[in-house]
Image (cartoon, rainbow, N blue to C red):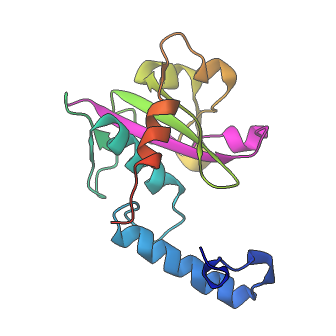
Amino acid sequence: MQSHDLPPRVADLETRTLLALYRGILRELKSRGVTRTENAPTGDYAEYLVALGLGGILATSSEKGWDVELPNGDHLQVKARVVSDPPRRGQLQLSPFRSFEFDAAVVVLLSDIDLEVVRAVMLPRAVLEASSAYRSHVNGFVGFATEDVLNHPSAVELTDCLRDAAAGISIE
């Protein structure tokens, strides 16, 4: 790589340049199919990695009960969070479950530095139902990606699988 090919030091860029760059990145991620919207990419990216890593297909945007369908027909809900090292408790709160119309959920924790997969586990729906509490102000059940939940005896570790999926993403 030649010196003129090096990315700019982010801290040296003007705010409007950073925002334009961010929007351009979001558009490019969408055009590559890595994300489905131009919103913050965390959830879309995690869903994409789960589908890619497990050989599933993404649900349509209108599907509210699940995010990925596996080859065996099981439906997965994907919950992603960006976490620091070590994670702060608030970073471990999952977005609300509006329904439990899925077979299992995959909890994906991504690094706050570069969105690398820190941890990913698949949990049966019953585990999430039992560990979540209804909150009327969000009209849903809120759970946390605590060590007890992530290390539940029925959890299936997917960290390496999703890291391999991320490593295989090309610039197509």
Residue 36 visible (yes or no): yes
Q: Nearer the viewer, residue 95 or 47?
A: 47
Asked if residue 119 lies left or right of residue 85, the reply is: left
Residue that sits furthest to the left in the current view: 72
Looking at the image, which residue is at 76% across and 39% down? 87
**Image coordinates for residue 77, horizontal then vertical, percent:** 40, 38
Bounds of the magenta segment: 73-98
* Magenta span includes 151: no
Q: Residue at x 49, y 53 (%)?
A: 43
Q: Estimate the x, y position of residue 24 in percent, counting from the top left.
A: 50, 81
The answer to which quarter of the image holds residue 5 is bottom right
Residue 16 appears left or right of 104: right
Q: Position of residue 134 (x, y in %)?
A: 57, 34
The foreground one among 48 and 100 is 48
Q: Is residue 20 left or right of residue 88?
A: left
> Residue 44: which quarter of the image?
bottom left
Look at 40% across and 54% down and name the residue there: 169
Query: Which residue is at the front of the view, 96 or 164?
Result: 164
Q: Position of residue 82 (x, y in %)?
A: 64, 49
Quadrant where the N terminus is found in the figure: bottom right
Is 81 part of what is drawn in magenta?
A: yes
